[in-house]
Structures are given as structure tokens and as C-alpha cells.
Image (cartoon, helix red, strand yellow):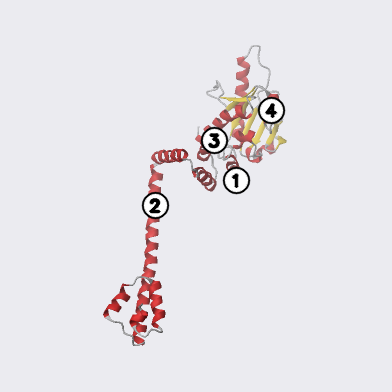
Amino acid sequence: MGHPDQFIKRTFAEETALITGGAVEWRDPPEMRLIKVQGDGLLSVHRSDDLVTFCEPWPQVGGHDEILIELKMPGDHVDVLAAQRALLRRQARQVQRVEEREPRWLGEQPLWLVAPHLPGWLGRVRRLRRVAAGCYGVEPSPFSFLWIAANELPLRDELVPFLVARSGRPLDEFARWVATRRRKEWVISMVQFTAMSTKVSEEILRDFARSDDPEVCRRQRHILKVLLEEFPDVQQQLLEQGIEKGREQGIEKGREKGIEAGRLVEARALLCRLLVRRQLAPSADELARIEACGDLVTLERWLDQSLTAETAADALR
């Protein structure tokens, strides 16, 4: 299982009970006896009445004590085969629940499938009932089958676990919004495990770096040190970039110094020529003074003065 899948499951596990005030909690599903057929997670419903005023899909837990939830992150397949496998895992849990009880359980196991978007093929083979923005009932079905399109959900605190499954621009929008609403450790995990744009991830990380608290700065430097040790290739890349930047700055400074030196040489030559033309030939000491001058402003002042000076000494005062 990849890190993004683990991250969204951990978010559901940590956030669900907090968001719903304990009305619903996440638990890992038991392994099903079908050569390991196991869903992504279960939502155990304790108090469905507490969720009536929550944003959809939470009110849809009403009448159920458990919901099988399947999570599809950006890049995961949401084709017919993926949906059928989700239905297979739902049916396996259905059988498992019947086997667990005596007398036999007569209910129907609900299925919530969370994905970035609603695939086009689904509307061609099933009837979709729009429950709310981003929430679609898949019909006909003998059980409650809800498809949750994270990209269409509103930005609400109680929907954070679902919103993690967003992709593209909706994910960037969510990341900017949630970055100030959750603890830093969680936000850093979101940056690490979701496919947000490089621009937004760098923006969020830079905001974290702005702190006047010495203890926060110390922890940030420690995190950076650990990460660089874990990724020596990135460390080498940063080193090479630093060397290249230093080289470019050196070349630029050298170019600037060369231009300045050329202007000094030109000003000295012009000053000497003007003094000679005005028959104010400078002495050996005065020539040495002109050659030793490395200040362009001074040389320009001497040039102006040499236009009216009566002696070379007056021009160089």
C-alpha cells in the first residue's frame, strides 16, 4: 500500500471521531476469508442523530451502524474493474457480518466510495441521484451505495478526511485552505503524500519557515537535517546548485569590475589628453597621482576642473 493511501486512512482514523464528536469512529476492518479480501476501512456509527446538521455525506449515516468505505486517491483506478472490486469487498463484508451473528443478520452493508471525481462511465451504466454537492447515490442498488467526489465537495472542516482525496486545482485550493486549520505535523504529511502542485507545496512550506520562535526554528532545522540525511541525492543537488550560483555570481561581479576598470582607464586617459591640449602638462608626481586614482567620481571632478584650471595642480586639487 502506498503512502498516499496510508495518509488518507490515517486522516480518517484521527479526524472522524473528533469531527463528529464521537458519533462516528473509524476502525480497521477485519480480514475477510476470501484469500484476503479486505476493504479500506469501516465507519462505526454510534449516534447518527448528532450528524443531522453536518455537511453531506455525514447525514447519510442515518439508519446504519456501520459503513464500508473505499478510498481512491489521485492516480488510482476508478474504472469498472475498480468499482466491481469495491462491490466484491462490500459483499464479502456483508457475508462476514451475517456469519458473525446468531440469529443471522438481515441488514444490508452500505458502501461509500471516495474518489477525486465522478467517472463518466458510471452515469452510463447506473442512475445517479445527486444527494448534495459531490455526493451521488448510485442506483439501482439493494443497499446504500454512495459515490463521493472530493473535488466537488465544499471546503468544510467536517469534510477534511474526504477532501484529502482531491486532485489537481481543487487539491491546491484545499491545501491552501487547510494549511492554517490543522497542526503542522499533519500539514507536512499532506505536503509529502498528496499530489499538490510544486508551487503550492513550496508556498506552504515557506509559510511554516517564518517563525520568530527559537524553539520552532530549532525543530525546523532538525527536521531539515534529518530529511537531508535521508535523501543524500537532494543534499548533493543543493550543493551543486549552490556552487553553480556562486560561480554565476562571481562571473557577474567580475563583469561589473571589468566595466568599472575600463571606465577608470578611459577617464584617466581623457584627463591626461585634456591637460596636454591645454598646455598644462602634468608633472611626474601628478601623472602618478592620476594613475593611482581609483575613484571615478574624483576623476570626473578633475576633468571638469581641467576645463578652466590655469595649472595641472589646480585641475587636480
Query: Which of these two is toward me, 174 or 223?
Result: 223
* Picture quadrant where residue 222 is located: top left
Which residue is rendered at x = 39% and y = 52% of the image? Answer: 242
N-term mark: 1 or 4: 4
Q: Earlier in the sequence, mark 2 or mark 3?
A: 3
- Whether pointer 2 and pointer 3 mark residues with C-beta atoms closer than 8 Å, the reply is no
Residue 169 got which mark?
1
Residue at horizontal 40 percent and vertical 76 percent from the top:
301
Amino acid carrying mark 2 in the image = Gly
Real-space Cα separation, disc 1 to disc 4, in angstroms = 29 Å
Residue type beneath disc 3: Arg
Q: Are circles 3 and 4 on residues that touch, CB within 8 Å?
A: no
Nearer the observer, 107 or 237: 237
Q: Is residue 80 visible?
A: no
Say left or right for 2 vs 236: right
Give x and y (percent) for residue 274.
37, 83
* Residue 230 image point, x, y percent: 40, 38
What is the C-alpha distance between the residues marked 3 and 1? 23 Å
Residue 299 image label: none
Do we see residue 3 in this rendering? yes
Give the farthest residue toward the left.
284
